[in-house]
């Protein structure tokens, strides 16, 4: 009987570790909106997360979102034909969303 209880306790402990470690709260997110100089959202903007190499392209609303990021300083490059390429940095904390909005300026 003691062996069964011991095995059940070990199993419960291991199961709780699996649940804890798969929790998204140990990761952070980096998200924001890309707009032009007149505060209009920009679609088709390439957003590159330098540290991971992950890339997204904004939709009509200008939003981007990178998920499941470790706690660290992240740099993004944003580019769109006809606009000046820009870069920005933001520190991401575990369990918290980090917001970074960027204004792209039209090339002359």
Image (tube, helix red, strand yellow):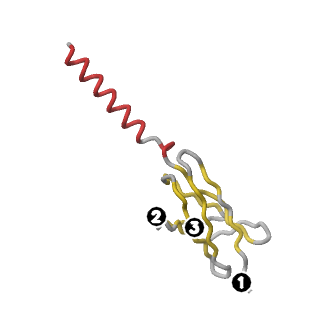
Image position of 26 (left or right of 11): right
**SS at mark 3?**
strand
Say which label, 2 or 3, has the lower sequence index: 2
Whole-angstrom CA distance, mark 1 to mark 2, is 28 Å
Say which label, 1 or 2, has the lower sequence index: 2
Identify the residue at image location x=33%, y=26%.
12
**SS at mark 1?**
loop
Closer to us: 6 or 56: 6
Instruction: Kindly identify which residue carries mark 2.
Output: 52
Q: Quadrant of residue 62?
A: bottom right
State yes or no: discs 1 and 2 in contact (Cβ < 8 Å): no
Location of residue 18 with respect to 77 vertically, above or below: above
Location of residue 17 with respect to 96 vertically, above or below: above
Residue 54 in picture, x, y percent from top left:
48, 65
Q: Quadrant of residue 38?
A: bottom right
Q: What numbered label is drawn on residue 76? A: 3
| Crowd tier of the residue under label 2, counting other residues whose Cα lies within 10 Å: few below 14, some 14–19, many 20 or above | few
Q: Nearer the viewer, mark 1 or mark 2?
A: 2
Whole-angstrom CA distance, mark 2 to mark 3, is 10 Å
Image position of 22 (left or right of 106): left
Image position of 92 (left or right of 13): right
| Crowd tier of the residue under label 1, counting other residues whose Cα lies within 10 Å: few below 14, some 14–19, many 20 or above | few
Report the quarter where the N terminus lies.
top left
Residue furthest to the bottom in view is 108
Residue 9 in picture, x, y percent from top left:
30, 23
**SS at mark 2?**
loop
| Crowd tier of the residue under label 3, counting other residues whose Cα lies within 10 Å: few below 14, some 14–19, many 20 or above | many
Whole-angstrom CA distance, mark 3 to mark 1, is 20 Å
Report the quarter where the C terminus lies.
bottom right
Instruction: Kindly identify which residue carries mark 1.
Output: 107
């Amino acid at each position: 009987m003691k062996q069964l209880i011991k095995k059940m306790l070990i199993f419960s402990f291991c199961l709780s570790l699996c649940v804890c470690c798969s929790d998204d709260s140990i990761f952070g997110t980096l998200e924001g909106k890309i707009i032009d100089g007149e505060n209009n959202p920009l679609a088709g903007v390439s957003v590159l997360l330098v540290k991971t190499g992950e890339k997204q392209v904004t939709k009509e609303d200008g939003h981007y979102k990178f998920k499941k990021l470790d706690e660290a300083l992240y740099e993004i490059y944003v580019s769109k034909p006809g606009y000046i390429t820009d870069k920005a940095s933001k520190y991401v904390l575990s369990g918290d969303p980090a917001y970074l909005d960027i204004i792209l300026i039209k090339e002359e």
